[in-house]
Amino acid sequence: DAGITQSPRHKVTETGTPVTLRCHQTENHRYMYWYRQDPGHGLRLIHYSYGVKDTDKGEVSDGYSVSRSKTEDFLLTLESATSSQTSVYFCATRETGNHGYTFGSGTRLTVV
Amino acid sequence: DQQVKQNSPSLSVQEGRISILNCDYTNSMFDYFLWYKKYPAEGPTFLISISSIKDKNEDGRFTVFLNKSAKHLSLHIVPSQPGDSAVYFCAASGRGGATNKLIFGTGTLLAVQP
C-alpha cells in the first residue's frame, strides 16, 4: 500500500547494537501499530500508538521502545538487538471508526 | 495464552474445489473478526470481516461464517484458484475501547494446486 512506507526493507545488524525501524504513513490515520511475524506465532503486537506522543505496550514489548512525534511517523527501536529479535516487522495503521488495519510491506531484520 | 487459534498450519486443495480455513477463539469479548491474506515478501491485506451480530458475510468467492456458541469462524473460498495460494490470518478485536487492538492467529498456508 503506497500510503504506508517501512524503512529499511531489510537490515542485518550485530547483537548488542541499537536499531530503529521507521513507519511513515500518508493516510493521516490516528492509530498505528508495530507487529512482528514469526513462524508458529503469527503476528504479535509489540507496541501501538493512539495519537501523537500517546503509545502503549503490546504483548511482546520487552526490548522494544517506540516514539511518535508526528502523526505520520511511528518509530520502533530495539535498544540492544538480540538474536531472538530476528523477525519480520510490520507496521499497520487504522482509521478512526474502522476495525481493519492497513499494513506496510514489512522490514526483515536479522540480528547476528 | 493464544486467544485466537488456527490449528491447521497448512492446507492443500485442487483448483476449482472449496477451501475451508478454520479459526477458534477463546475470548467471548471479541465482537469483530477479520481475515487477512499474505503473500511472501508483502504485508497482510484485508480480505473479509464479520461482526458478532451476524453469522455469515459473503463477498464474491469468499464467505466467512461465525458460530458464536462454539467460538469458531471459518473462511470458505469457492472456487479456489491458484492465485489464492497464500497465508491466511484470522484476527479478532474486542470491545476494548478506542485502541481496538487486533489479535491474530498463527496463520494457515493455503496451497491451491492447478
Image: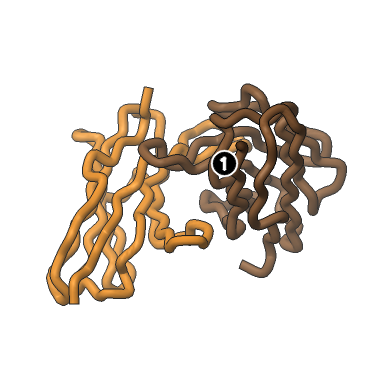
Chain colours: A brown, B orange
The percent position of residue B88, horizontal first and vertical second, equals 35, 54
Kindly identify the amino acid type of the residue bearing the numbered disc 1: Tyr
Reply above or below: B17 against A57: below
> In which quadrant of the rendered image does the C terminus of chain A lie?
top right
Reply above or below: A22 against B105: below
Q: Can residue B92 be seen in this view?
A: no
> With B63 as the anchor, is A62 left or right in this view?
right
Reply above or below: A74 against B5: below
At 35% from the left and 62% from the top, the residue drawn is B86
> With B69 as the anchor, is A22 left or right in this view?
right
> In which quadrant of the rendered image does the N terminus of chain A lie?
bottom right
The percent position of residue A79, horizontal first and vertical second, equals 74, 28
> With B78 as the anchor, is B101 left or right in this view?
right
Question: Residue B16 sits in which quadrant?
Answer: bottom left
Question: Residue A58 sits in which quadrant?
Answer: top right
Q: Is residue A6 visible?
A: yes
Of B89 and B33, which appears nearest the observer? Answer: B89
Mark 1 element type: strand
> With B91 as the anchor, is B58 left or right in this view?
left
The percent position of residue B37, horizontal first and vertical second, equals 40, 59
Of all chains, the one bearing label 1 is A
At 71% from the left and 32% from the top, the residue drawn is A78
At 53% from the left and 58% from the top, the residue drawn is B43
At 41% from the left and 44% from the top, the residue drawn is B91
Q: Name the residue under label 1.
A: A35
